[in-house]
Image (spheres, rainbow, N blue to C red):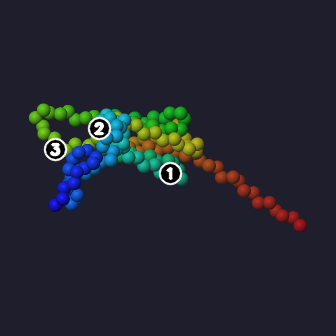
Amino acid sequence: MSMIPSFFGGQRSNIFDPFSLNVWDPFKDFSTQISKENSAFFNTRIDWKETPEAHVLKADLPGLNKEEVKVEVEDDRVVRISGERKIEKEDKNDTWHRVERSSGKFVRSFRLPENVKMDQIKAAMENGVLTVTVPKVEVKKPDVKAIEICG
């Protein structure tokens, strides 16, 4: 089996082993502005749908309760959802094998269209899913009057 040197990090990897952990990561050396405290921001998934009656935002926030989440309105039509997932207390006797759950602060903002009633926003939290409902302004259908044609 042939071993080839890696030109991107000085490690050797086996090109024939599909399970090799020595895989070149092109983004490894980039410095990012993402800190451990803000990692939850990128994991907060939110769906936005529009129904005939309202705009509905649904956010998956597992492990959070309603006291740890804020829903705010800013600049008239911007809905801002924020919160914080706390880091578990570590015990010096514990041995961690894998840490995949994110922790830290998150913030998501959505600018809604003009046809919403921002003063009637409702939010509910159930089973780790936040649902924000923003009713739409009822569009009045124009009155149609038939005109008789003479002649």
Q: At label 3, which amino acid type do we have?
A: His
SS class, disc 3: loop
State the separation of the CA atoms marked 1 and 3: 42 Å
For label 1, the residue is 50
Provide residue 39's location: percent of width, then percent of height.
Answer: 32, 39
Q: Position of residue 36 (x, y in %)?
A: 30, 35
Q: Please tell me whether residue 109 is drawn above or below residue 147 in the rendered image.
A: above
Q: Amino acid at mark 1?
A: Glu
Q: 37 or 127, which lies in front?
A: 37
Q: Which mark is residue 129?
A: none
Q: Residues within 10 Å of mark 1 (few under 14, many from 20)?
A: few
**Residue 70: x, y in percent?**
40, 35
Q: Which residue is mark 3?
A: 97
Q: Among all residues in the image, which is located at the extreme right?
A: 151
Q: CA distance from mark 1 to mark 2?
A: 30 Å
Q: Residue at x 64, y 49 (%)?
A: 140
Of pointers 2 and 3, the one earlier in the residue sequence: 3
Front-lying residue, 20 or 134: 20
Helix, strand or loop status at disc 2? loop
Query: Which mark is on residue 103?
Result: 2
Rate crowding at label 2 as few (under 14), some (14 to 19) or many (20 or more) other CA atoms within 10 Å: some
Whether the residues at callouts 1 and 2 have beta carbons within 8 Å, the answer is no
